[in-house]
Amino acid sequence: MRAQTAGRRIAIGGFSHESNSFAPSQDVGLNHFLRRRDRPPLLLGDQMLDELSTGSFPTTGFLQAIGQEHALVPLAWASGGAGGMVSDEAFEHVCGALLSRLTEAPLPDAIYLELHGAMATPSLDDPEAELLRRVREVVGEDLPIAVTLDYHANLSPAFARMIDGAVVYRTYPHVDRVACGKIAAALIHRLLAHGRSAGVAIAHSPFLIPLHAQCTLDGPSQRIAGQSLADAGEVVSRCYAAGFPLNDRHWCGPAIMVHADTQKAADGACGHLYSRLMDEARNFDAALWPVNAAVKEAIQRCRAPGDGPILLADVQDNPGAGAGSNTTSLLAELVRAKAEDALLGILCDGQAAAVAHAAGQGATIEVNLGQPAFAGRFLVERLGSGRLMSTGTVAGGLQLDLGPMALLRTGGTRIAVSSARMQAFDPAPFHHLGADRAQAAILALKSTCHFRADFAPLARGILLVEAPGDAPADPSGYPYSRLRPGVQRTPR
Ligand SMILES: [Zn+2]
């Protein structure tokens, strides 16, 4: 555990969830936050320091960079990943855990919070702003607060006014979480020296950007996210957040948020980056492949000379956007088209995994896999406990528990099956089942963009596939009830 040294007192905490408001079957309650899944469960007090000193969360970077001279006051930390809405009970429980420790401790000099920015609950339009409001109720208006936020944050003016600086991930795939935590530590140092930021500005684009058009590896998103910065002259932080369109709230959508020493500096920096965003509107590419065309194209490309797999991204069944990671349209098409060497994952079906474990490795089983049920005979090629360490660049170094896992084969297609949902962005769950991602001709991945970090470098081609799922790529059809009127559903 980190030694508590004399110095300024910095309270730290976190509460993150990316909530798809339109996937009721994936709604999460308190138990979700109390279990270890693909991340630690709710951490209280010193547990935060023990668990988060290593790993790949922003708090990890913050702890590594904040320096020994300060006394840290760990409050509570919970990360729910992505799913449906967070229950009111879960929200109240985690907020209560964080706020009770803040209330009991002597008043800190500054606060750092790791937030996501796209949580949804049944009762609240802007849960993160509500958490901040309660924090301010305890500590008052004078002490500075800095936060880290996901690239998919939906930011509101009320939220912006309650904080003094922010670091939004500049990457999607999110490979800079730890780096952002380190920048937040520098931000806290600046705020401790200068006090609260006098200037705050926020501007929202009049359009939404579909998730699969938000990748920062190239194109408009790269050019805009590259303009985010911290601590330049009078500007404390200048952030671009692309927004999470599946999160139904008034201020859903892309935004620029600036904190500065003066209002003039905040307005200037915000206006500058906002113009860049508007100039790029026509450049966001949101094309997707129909399932059968994508599989046909992949099989044809595999026959041409070349190395590495063709990647099929099953973007609408991405559990990282709150989908179930269990749909079978792409699987059915791969089997129907007699793909010769395809590897699909990670398909979450605890019942099928249990049947495979009961039958044993080498057995043949008959199961209804996923949704809609894909009925078939499968060879159980490999079994796994699901307890493994992540190794990828997006979220490596985490102890995972995906429940019983199995590698099933039907024809030329192998399916990596888990009992808990995890987006297919890390090689480790595949290796856990003896499946080398480089040695399949076609890789079908339940992921929108994160897969690119570790899978794209070895691929010879990538096709984004429009197979049915709980995370529809096109926001035009989302049944919003809270989104402010007049927002265009796509940039073009
Ligand atoms: Zn994100």
Image: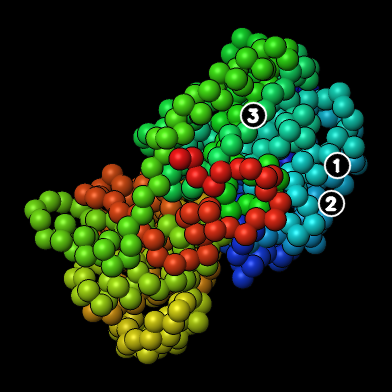
Residue at the image point whose x is 44% and y is 48% from the top? 212
Q: Earlier along the polypeptide chain: callout 2 or callout 1?
A: 2
> Which residue is more in the foreground, 415 or 288?
288
How has the structure been colored for display? rainbow
Instruction: Give the labeled residue for mark 1.
Output: 134
Residue 488 higher or lower than 35, as above or below: above
Label 3 sits on a secondary structure element that is strand
Q: Nearer the viewer, mark 2 or mark 1?
A: 1
Label 2 sits on a secondary structure element that is helix
Disc 2/disc 1 C-alpha distance (Å): 10 Å
Measured as percent of width and height from the top left, residue 377 is found at 32, 87
Residue 37 higher or lower than 367, as above or below: above
Disc 3/disc 1 C-alpha distance (Å): 24 Å
Mark 3 and mark 2 in contact (Cβ < 8 Å)?
no
Measured as percent of width and height from the top left, residue 190 is found at 69, 17
Q: Earlier along the polypeptide chain: callout 3 or callout 1?
A: 1
Task: State the count of labels.
Answer: 3
Measured as percent of width and height from the top left, residue 451 is found at 39, 51
Can I make out residue 492 in this image?
yes
State which quadrant residue 144 falls in.
Answer: top right
Dot 3, how many residues are within 10 Å of its Cα: few (below 14), some (14-19), or many (20+)? some
Residue at the image point whose x is 47% and y is 55% from the top? 473
Instruction: Give the labeled residue for mark 2.
Output: 96
Instruction: Give the labeled residue for mark 3.
Output: 203
Measured as percent of width and height from the top left, residue 486 is found at 63, 43
Residue at the image point whose x is 29% and y is 77% from the top? 409
| Amino acid type at mark 2 | Gly
| Amino acid type at mark 1 | Arg
